[in-house]
Image (cartoon, rainbow, N blue to C red):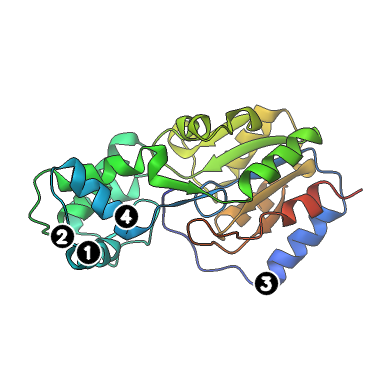
Amino acid sequence: MPDHAEPPEASNGGVDAARSRASRRPVEAVLFDFHGTLAQVEDAHDWVVAAAATCGVSLERIRATVLADRLLTAGRAGGPLPARVPPRLAELWADRDLYEHAHRGAYTGLAETVDAGIDGFADALYERVLVPDGWVPYPDTEPVLSALRAAGVKVAVVSNIGFDLRPFFDAWGLAGLVDAYALSYEVGRCKPDPGIFLRACGMLGVDPERTLMVGDTPADAGAVNAGCGVLVLPAAGPGRSGGLGAVLDLALRP
């Protein structure tokens, strides 16, 4: 969710192997990454326009587009990693998924490197990431979570993130479909550290060997080292399906 540096992409062979392994054993629980798996940040243009509006500024489309491009290059929570992290932000950046203050400080600091000429703009941009309206659940998120719930399969959200995701699921009417949240800033471990996946399994009371981790990055594939099966899906844009339905083929297969 929003949100962290990732290792290089995993090979298809590793993903296929983990996927095959998961399909040969009963799945009692599914762990889901948040950003890029269950939801996506809103369109960058909309993000910039909404943040400026809270500062009392109405942006013309061209100006908003230019600012959005510059801010994406600088680094956006839930968006592309920064092209460069200024030395003064290096410590905050390294700790961003472990502490709330570091997450806020890192991303507002990056936004401040873009001179928008709007007072309070960097904070407004960050605040937009903290509200449900700043995110878009994927269209297949609710159907997949509902199907798992109906089948008695437990669900946890496992995310490298510096703020609470529970209010998002509450606002989207999905809270009743999630049994636990293993958030890096609460757990004190970040993916791909196996500790965060083991913590999620412990919260659910399930054996990692009967658990499937679903994500969109090689960091999510770190769950293999915790004994979990892994399914890595392609990230999709806001409102577009990333193939989340494949989870049901693995988790609910007889």
Residue 144 rendering spot, x and y as whole percentages: 70, 45
- Where disc 4 sits, the SS reads helix
Q: Alpha carbon of mark 3 to alpha carbon of mark 1: how far?
A: 40 Å
Front: mark 3 or 1? 1
The mark nearer the N terminus, 3 or 1, is 3
Which amino acid is tagged 3?
Asn
Rendered image: mark on residue 185 = none
Tag 1 and tag 2, C-beta contact below 8 Å: no
Front: mark 2 or 3? 2
Tag 3 and tag 1, C-beta contact below 8 Å: no
The mark nearer the N terminus, 2 or 4, is 4
Compared to residue 217, the image places residue 203 above or below, namely: above
Which amino acid is tagged 1?
Arg
- Where disc 3 sits, the SS reads helix
Residue name at image x 68 percent, y 40 percent: 145
Residue that mark 2 sits on: 114
How many numbered dots are placed on residues in this image? 4
Q: Viewed as shown, does residue 151 lie left or right of 200?
A: right
Evaluate whether residue 109 shows in this view.
yes
Residue name at image x 69 percent, y 57 percent: 231
Residue that mark 4 sits on: 46
Few, some or many residues within 10 Å of mark 1 (<14, 14–19, 20+): few
Front: mark 2 or 4? 4
Q: Viewed as shown, does residue 80 lie left or right of 180?
A: left
Q: Quadrant of residue 23?
A: bottom right
Residue 98 rendering spot, x and y as whole percentages: 39, 39
Residue that mark 1 sits on: 61
Residue that mark 3 sits on: 12
Compared to residue 218, the image places residue 198 above or below, namely: above
Q: Alpha carbon of mark 2 to alpha carbon of mark 4: how far?
A: 17 Å
Residue 200 rendering spot, x and y as whole percentages: 62, 35
Residue 194 rendering spot, x and y as whole percentages: 60, 45
